[in-house]
Amino acid sequence: MKRFVATLLALTAIVTLACSSSAEGREIDIEVEPEACAPATVAVTPGEAITFNVNNHANADREFEGIEGTRIEEVLVPDGRTRHIDYTVPDATDATYLVKCYSPDGPTTIIELVAGEGSAAVDPSAATASIDVALAEWSVTPSAPSVEAGTVRFVAHNESETMTHELAILAIGENGERFEIAEVEGLEPGQSGEVVATLEPGTYQLACLIAPGEAGSTEDHYASGMHTEFTVE
Amino acid sequence: MLFSFLITLREGFEIALVLAIVLGYLARTGNRAHFGRVWLGAGLAVALSSVVVVALEVTSRDLSPAASEAFEGVMMLVAVVVLTWMVFWMRRQAAGIGAELRRQVNVALSGSSRWGLAGLAFLSVMREGIETGVFLFAGSTTASGSPAMFWFGAVAGFAVAAALGYVVYRGSHRLPLRQFFTVSGIAVLVIAAGMVSNGIAELQESGFIANLGSRPWDTDSWLSLTDASGKFFHTLLGYDPAPTWGQIALFWGYLVSGVAFFLFWPHPTTRLMPAPAGTNETPTPSGHAGDSERQHAR
């Protein structure tokens, strides 16, 4: 009997110790208001350790959890309370991780953790190649199907007579998931715009990601056909 | 790897504990023949939750959070009912053990209780199977270490949980029969009380029911659910840093009345006398335990 109890206690102690590893990192405050959680986008560095301080002022309970593979287990944040949630950003560059801040029967905010350098970090004058891209209903047509790796300038022309479009450059992950790495937004009919991105060899997509309800649109532009494969050699 | 390991260890350990107690009970009462039914129930649950998980992946559809939480909550409360039934069923059997062990137990097992045991194993596994499966699928696609390491962690977690369950099962053979019934019965009541609190919490979170009152305290800074150890106590014992009054009342109400009934409610056929202190303290090989019980029962 004593040996049995001792064994059980020892096992419990081992399991508890094994489970209590946690690393605290850079603190990021998430404010939970009745309508939404803020901020909706957080810039992170690959491999970085983060601690979210989730402050709930929503007058109702909220939950915080990683979705689509982001490794944060569901945590209940009761009304008026704060929860500290540790997360280590994976090492991959140019990736986006999604976290859902929500109530199952109420408002939902998807918080994007954007890892890696976006277009802002690229010096436009360093561009070594330039690609013209025509945007229309419903097609994205680059002036060339491929380009050599390096810093590339994309000049987008909205050829539509009625619709607002945008150009997003999407990297394709190992499992087919798409990561937006640069974009030029809100091009009115006839308008042009530029975006510069540093591209490694691989397969990319050029696309318009305007969704129903965005920029006065009632259609999902990507699903309607505004995307095309683009190769970096 | 550690991430998936901790999840499967935690969920697996609870399942392993319940199965170890049920199998230990069957072994101690000469009912090894019914092991198959328990494994059948567990196996069916593994198969069914795998099918659901694969179907969700193939159709790339997510369970709505409200639906999956409500599902889990309801499954937990059903599991509480079955666990409670099991404890008192075991207690009734224990009462007759002194007299004619085999006949008594065989009579009991010939009824619906056989399927009750299979159902219990099924519920234990099914309850967490779908969620853990969905979670593992989603988690394995994020690039942090290789998917192979991720799955290795998940399998290792289940393996360690199974090993711990086996230790409990073997250890239960060392206990004198009476103590085995008492200890395992109370252990099951404690686990079930945790499920009462967790089940209510899931239903509250899903919005299926309103919060049952305010949350009188918050011990999150002391032991947080965001820590793996807090999560472990949450899964196994129903620890909640900020429970609602309803969770508190139902947890303690269930636990206190359950244990009181279990220990003190006289069963009509109870003839067992308390064993002398000496025999309780000595680990007794299982074959002899029944004999000493039989003497005291007469």
Image (tube, helix red, strand yellow):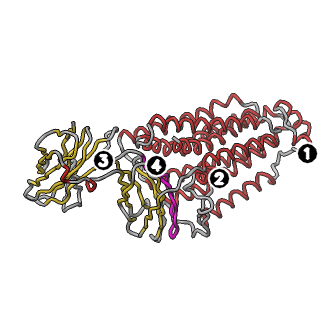
Tell me what residue is drawn at x 50 percent, y 60 percent.
B205
Please determine if labels 3 and 4 lie on a single subunit. Answer: yes
Q: Which amino acid does label 4 sit on?
A: Arg
Mark 1 falls within which chain? B
Q: Which of B52 and A39 is in front in this view?
A: A39
Q: Would residue A186 appear left or right of B10 to someone viewing this image? A: left
Q: What element carries label 4?
A: loop
Can residue B95 be seen here? The reply is: no
Q: What element carries label 1?
A: helix
Label ID, residue B237: 2
Q: What residue type is labelled 1?
A: Ala
Please determine if labels 1 and 3 lie on a single subunit. Answer: no
Q: Would residue A65 appear left or right of B172 to someone viewing this image? A: left
Toward the top, the furthest residue is: B33
Mark 2 falls within which chain? B
Q: Where is residue A171 in the image (x, y as percent from the top left)?
A: 28, 44
Label ID, residue B277: 1
Q: Name the residue under label 3.
A: A179
